[in-house]
Image (cartoon, grey):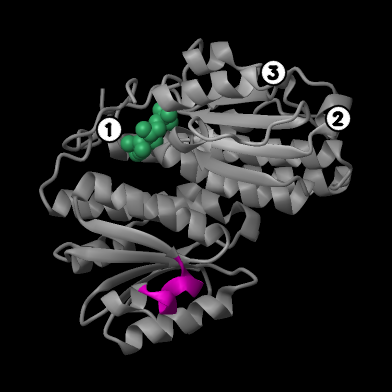
Amino acid sequence: EKGGYPDFMLKEIHEQPRVVRDTLAGRMAGGMLTIDELDLSHDELNLIDRIYVIACGTSYHAGLVAKQLIEGWARIPTEVEVASEFRYRNPIITPTTLVVAVSQSGETADTLAAIRDARVRGAKVFGITNVVGSPVARESDGVIYTKANKEIAVASTKSFLGQVVSLTLLAMLLAQSKGKLTTSQIKLLFKELADTAEQIETILSDTAAIDKAALACKDACSSLFIGRGLGAAICAEGALKLKEISYLHAESYPAGEMKHGPIALIDDGFPVVAVATQSPTYEKTISNLQESRARGALIVAIATEGDTEIEKHADYVIYIPKVRDCFSPITASVPLQLFARAIAVARGCDVDQPRNLAKSVTVE
Ligand code: M6R
């Protein structure tokens, strides 16, 4: 049932183009984006003035992407919180607050408790989950199902992609309701979003550069993942993926934070993985690579195809197809999944079933 792949994680990584296509299917009708399951009228959507995205682990990282897209497009203040923090504090919730709960399994104890708490306080709750009929789906006011299908590897990959695509759609929908994006802008964005399926296929068709970089890093004791903007969100997920399946310590930092502490870690051969795709802050990230390299770091850069300049600043460059910055989380997370898996395999780890972890965390 691994479909010829050596492990479920690799099989699931390869399913991601399908996940993108299935998640988008039926969402555009007559030039309008629709998410009927949300069960909120255009007017109700329009009234939303504060959003909390609550989740744990990888799903929290999808939330970090969502914050930037919702604020960027729909201009609605959005906070992302780990559910185990949200539920034990006193968040500001009004009738026009929307809580978006993201959970692959739909049964994470803290996320579920946060949903209940938010509803008692009067918030509308949207669930984003992969499991039909799960507690998150049942207890939310509306639900978007990610179309990942059953995910077996403990490390989330395809469900993360499904979450990011669903949250991207939600951000676009909110922007549409608020009149912040025009019909033609939405149409163009939707097309480019759909194109990411093919771009992921391109990434999956040649992983030689990823495997080479992984071999160079496999014996490290620690590593840093750095990026800016959406790249920083993807780094958080890349670092989690690496530590959970390979037990190689990995930490992520917004690249601009390097000189505020983490750069002290760097000595000869210390791996620094950078998401340095084309974005408004590309040049700034390059400066961070230079600073790190000058101190001996081994640099692995995820970069945009055609960017030869970056080869001067990195030991290993992993090229991915050019996309608009807002869609870079969808494409840039794929090489980071493969990188983590390649290191885990090289270190002899059980990639599908890492020690101490369970697929569903139903106790707090
Ligand atoms: O099922 P959920 O999305 O609520 O699970 C949240 C986390 O437990 C989960 O993402 C965990 O971090 C994974 N092991 C990540 O690969």
- Report the amino acid beneath label 1: Phe
Query: On screen, 36 above or below 184?
Result: above
Confirm whether the magenta stretch covers residue 324.
Answer: no
SS at badge 1: helix
In the depicted view, which residue is nearer to us: 129 or 205? Answer: 129
SS at badge 2: loop
Mark 2, Cα crowd under 10 Å, few <14 / some 14-19 / many 20+, is: few
Q: Can you give x and y, in whole percent of width and height, for residue 281 in the image? A: 60, 73
SS at badge 3: helix
Q: Which residue lies furthest to the bottom in this view?
A: 294
Reading the image, the residue beneath label 3 is 37
Instruction: Of the two numbered discs 3 and 1 on the same chain, state the one appearing first in sequence.
Output: 1
Q: Residue at x 64, y 55 (%)?
A: 326
Q: Residue at x 37, y 74 (%)?
A: 261
Residue 8 bears which disc, if any?
1
Residue 24 bears which disc, if any?
none
Mark 3, Cα crowd under 10 Å, few <14 / some 14-19 / many 20+, is: few
Between marks 3 and 1, how big is the CA–CA gap?
A: 30 Å
Q: Can you give x and y, in whole percent of width and height, for residue 8 in the image? A: 27, 32
Magenta span main SS: helix
Reading the image, the residue beneath label 2 is 30
Part of the protein shown in magenta: 254-261
In which quadrant is the N terminus drawn?
Answer: top left
Report if residue 110 is visible in the image: yes
Instruction: Of the two numbered discs 2 and 3 on the same chain, state the one appearing first in sequence.
Output: 2
Q: Can you give x and y, in whole percent of width and height, for residue 328 in the image? A: 56, 56
Query: Count of labels shown?
Result: 3
Q: Depth-wise, is mark 3 or mark 1 nearer the camera?
A: 3
Q: Residue at x 36, y 27 (%)?
A: 151
